[in-house]
Image (cartoon, rainbow, N blue to C red):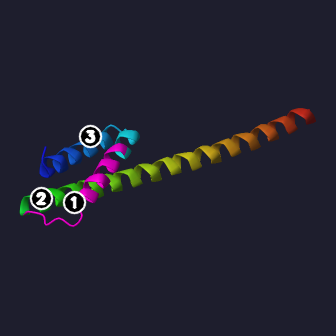
Amino acid sequence: MDDVQVMRYLARSLTHAASQHDWPAMQDVDAQIAALLASLKGQTLSAEKREALADLQQTHANVSRFCQAQSDDLEQKMASARRNREGATAYALFADAEDMGQ
């Protein structure tokens, strides 16, 4: 596979892993992208390679935004769970105190 095909493959793989919420696969693809970029360092890129690289960069940026949104959503859910747990604990303590008073 030449570099252009690799870039297109990595963009598709990253998109697929994100759509499946497959975080380990996304990390693996990200590492492959980093290795590819390191191998391209210092090379003069053809127009086709520059276009494929720009597409890969756009895909990476989109997936990064998606991951951040997922992280933010999870953080909100965890905060809500903590608040609910604290509320349930307070309610249980209040109920126990009332039971003791009767």
Frontmost of labels 2 and 1 is 1
Q: Amino acid at mark 1?
A: Leu
Q: Give coordinates of residue 52: x percent, y percent.
A: 14, 56
Q: Give coordinates of residue 18: x percent, y percent.
A: 32, 43
Q: Label 3: which residue? A: 16
Nearest the viewer among 71 and 30 is 30
Q: Please check the rendered image and state whether residue 89 is part of the magenta-colored stretch, yes or no.
A: no
At mark 2, the secondary structure is helix
Q: Compared with residue 93, is residue 2 higher up or lower down, i.e. above or below?
A: below
Badge 2 or badge 1: first in the primary sequence: 1
Quadrant (top left/top right/bottom left/bottom right) for the N terminus? top left
Residue 14: image quadrant is top left
At mark 1, the secondary structure is helix
Total marks in image: 3
Quadrant (top left/top right/bottom left/bottom right) for the C terminus? top right
Task: Verify CB contact (< 8 Å) between mark 2 and mark 1.
Answer: yes
Nearest the viewer among 14 and 93 is 14
Q: Identify the residue shown where x is 56% and y is 46%.
A: 78
Residues rendered magenta in the picture: 28-46
Q: Amino acid at mark 3?
A: His
Frontmost of labels 3 and 2 is 2
Q: CA distance from mark 3 to mark 2?
A: 22 Å
Q: Compared with residue 91, is residue 7 higher up or lower down, i.e. above or below?
A: below
Q: Label 2: which residue? A: 49
Q: CA distance from mark 3 to mark 1?
A: 24 Å
Frontmost of labels 3 and 1 is 1
**Disc 2 packing (10 Å; few <14; some 14–19; many ≥20):** some
Q: Give coordinates of residue 77: x percent, y percent.
A: 52, 46
Residue 15: image quadrant is top left
Q: Identify the residue shown where x is 84% and y is 35%.
A: 96
